[in-house]
Image: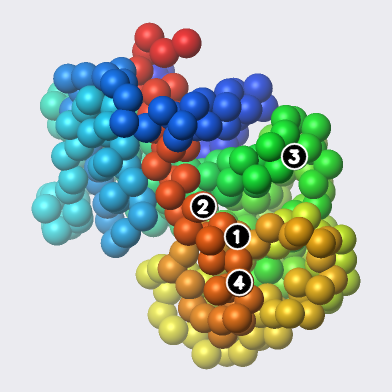
Amino acid sequence: MNHVRNFLSVYDFTKDEIYDVLLRSAVLKAERGGKNACLEGKKIGMLFEKSSTRTRVSFEVGIAELGGYPIFMSSRDLQLGRGEPVKDTARVLSRYLDGAIIRTFEQERIETFARYFEKPVINGLTDLYHPAQILTDIFTVYEIKNGGADIIENLKIVYFGDANNMANSWVSLQAALGFELVLAMPEGFGIDKAVRMESEKRGGKFIISGDKISAAKNADVITTDVFISMGQDEEKEKIDKLRPFIIDDNVVKNAKDGVIFLHCLPVHRNEEVAEDVFERFSPVVFEEAENRLHVQKAVMEKIFNKNIR
């Protein structure tokens, strides 16, 4: 059985380790272009069963900037696409590679791969969690606030929209770091039972609100995601229920002055966020997109390089 360290959710890092990643991300961002060969000679597989822009490019560039060799494989390139069991693919690839980044569907799929792959695994996205993105989001806030743990722990963060992998990731991060979290979503929408139970086990607390204006009151951070997640069919009924939770001027006006708006991209303008609101906050959103690179380099240092401090 595999006993190497993986990063499949934020729970794989302690609170102190999360702050270490934030600090290290800032250093890597400031020193980008300098010599860093901590992954020199390492071959990192990138198994993507879902399409990607930011995740693929940021990880590929990050691996290269750390001196490693990214090897990209889509489901079309692998026997996984023809029905080979995940555990067999993992056992074969572990003989070739020094680590893997997986972007797939069910969380169980990546967990099965990690059990049989004898090297470290990083979650590039599943239907349940998106840990690389959520660390990027909180790093972007940390960077803007220019503060430490006390700054983050005293934040009010409000997520608007579907109970998807980003909502789940905010729930997991809240359990790890302890800020105030409100999820603004329609009646009948709720967090995955397993995600809720894991959060509660770790002392996590969050509120689900059906009133987006009261939810936004005094928010330090407002954030959202597409209403229909990747791989889902277009669901008009679901969109109709979510449409009232669009982030518009009324939401922004009820948040704190200087509120930070985040979006993991791609954005559907005038669906989850009004176009004028998005464009007003777009400099931060695209800084957030860049920060994927720096945060993921910090994570890869910790997971793929045994000698990192």
Residue at horizontal 11 percent and vertical 53 percent from the top: 77
* Callout 3 secondary element: helix
Q: Nearer the viewer, mark 2 or mark 4?
A: 4
The Cα atoms of the two marked residues, 1 and 4, are separated by: 12 Å
At label 2, the amino acid type is: Glu
At label 3, the amino acid type is: Ile
Q: Is residue 92 above or below residue 290?
A: above
Residue at horizontal 38 percent and vertical 70 percent from the top: 231
Question: Does the CB distance between marks 2 and 1 fall below 8 Å?
Answer: yes
Q: Which residue is mark 3?
A: 152
Which numbered tag is attached to residue 77? none
Where residue 272 sits: x, y (%)?
Answer: 59, 77
The Cα atoms of the two marked residues, 2 and 1, are separated by: 7 Å
Question: Does the CB distance between marks 1 and 4 fall below 8 Å?
Answer: no
Q: Which residue is mark 1?
A: 262
Residue nearest the observer in this picture, 245 or 66:
66
Crowd rating for badge 2 (residues with CA inside 10 Å; few <14, some 14–19, many 20+): many
The Cα atoms of the two marked residues, 2 and 4, are separated by: 14 Å
Q: Nearer the viewer, mark 1 or mark 4?
A: 4
* Callout 2 secondary element: helix
Where residue 183 sits: x, y (%)?
Answer: 74, 62
Where residue 86 sits: x, y (%)?
Answer: 26, 43
At label 1, the amino acid type is: Leu
Residue at horizontal 40 percent and vertical 18 percent from the top: 3
The Cα atoms of the two marked residues, 3 and 1, are separated by: 15 Å
At label 4, the amino acid type is: Arg
The Cα atoms of the two marked residues, 2 and 3, are separated by: 17 Å
